[in-house]
Image (cartoon, rainbow, N blue to C red):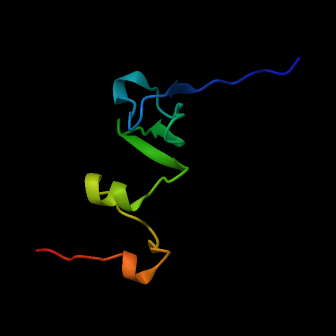
C-alpha cells in the first residue's frame, strides 16, 4: 500500500503559515494559491515556489522581488507601466 504524505495545508486564499506553526524545514502549502512554504533556521517562513510564486500582484501588494524578468503578455495597448516616486 502506498504511503500518503500530507503537508500542512490551507485552502484560504493568500494565507501564509505562521513561523510558530512550522518546524524548521517542514513544508506547508496553500492549496488555493498553489504555493509552498517552509521555515528556515532563522525562524523565517519563506515561499518555496509553486503556481505564481512571484506575480506582478505580489510585487505590487507585498513588495516581493522577482529574481527574473516579469513579462506582460498580450495586447500592448491594454497594459501600462506607471512609475511613481
- In the rendered image, the residue lying farthest to the top is 1
The residue that appears at 42% across and 58% down in the rendered structure is: 55
Q: Where is residue 41 drawn, in percent x and y?
A: 41, 38
Q: Is 1 situated left or right of 20 in this image?
A: right
Q: How many marks?
A: 0
Looking at the rendering, in which quadrant would you find the N terminus?
A: top right
Looking at the rendering, in which quadrant would you find the C terminus?
A: bottom left
The residue that appears at 51% across and 36% down in the rendered structure is: 32
| Vertical position of residue 68 compared to residue 4: above or below | below
Q: Is 63 situated left or right of 48 in this image?
A: left
- In the rendered image, the residue lying farthest to the right is 1
The residue that appears at 35% across and 29% down in the rendered structure is: 18
Q: Where is residue 13 drawn, in percent x and y?
A: 41, 35
* Residue 15 position by quadrant: top left
| Vertical position of residue 2 compared to residue 53: above or below | above
Q: Nearer the viewer, residue 54 or 81?
A: 81
The residue that appears at 38% across and 35% down in the rendered structure is: 16
- In the rendered image, the residue lying farthest to the left is 85
Q: Nearer the viewer, residue 13 or 39?
A: 13
Q: Where is residue 66 drawn, in percent x and y?
A: 41, 65
Q: Nearer the viewer, residue 4 or 56?
A: 56
Q: Where is residue 47 drawn, in percent x and y?
A: 45, 46
Amino acid at each position: 500500500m502506498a504511503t500518503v504524505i500530507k503537508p500542512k495545508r490551507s485552502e484560504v486564499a493568500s494565507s501564509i503559515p505562521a513561523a510558530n506553526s512550522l518546524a524548521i524545514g517542514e513544508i506547508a502549502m496553500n492549496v488555493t494559491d498553489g504555493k509552498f512554504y517552509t521555515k528556515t533556521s532563522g525562524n523565517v517562513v519563506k515561499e518555496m515556489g509553486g503556481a505564481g510564486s512571484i506575480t506582478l500582484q505580489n510585487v505590487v501588494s507585498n513588495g516581493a522581488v522577482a529574481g527574473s524578468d516579469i513579462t506582460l503578455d498580450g495586447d500592448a495597448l491594454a497594459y501600462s507601466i506607471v512609475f511613481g516616486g
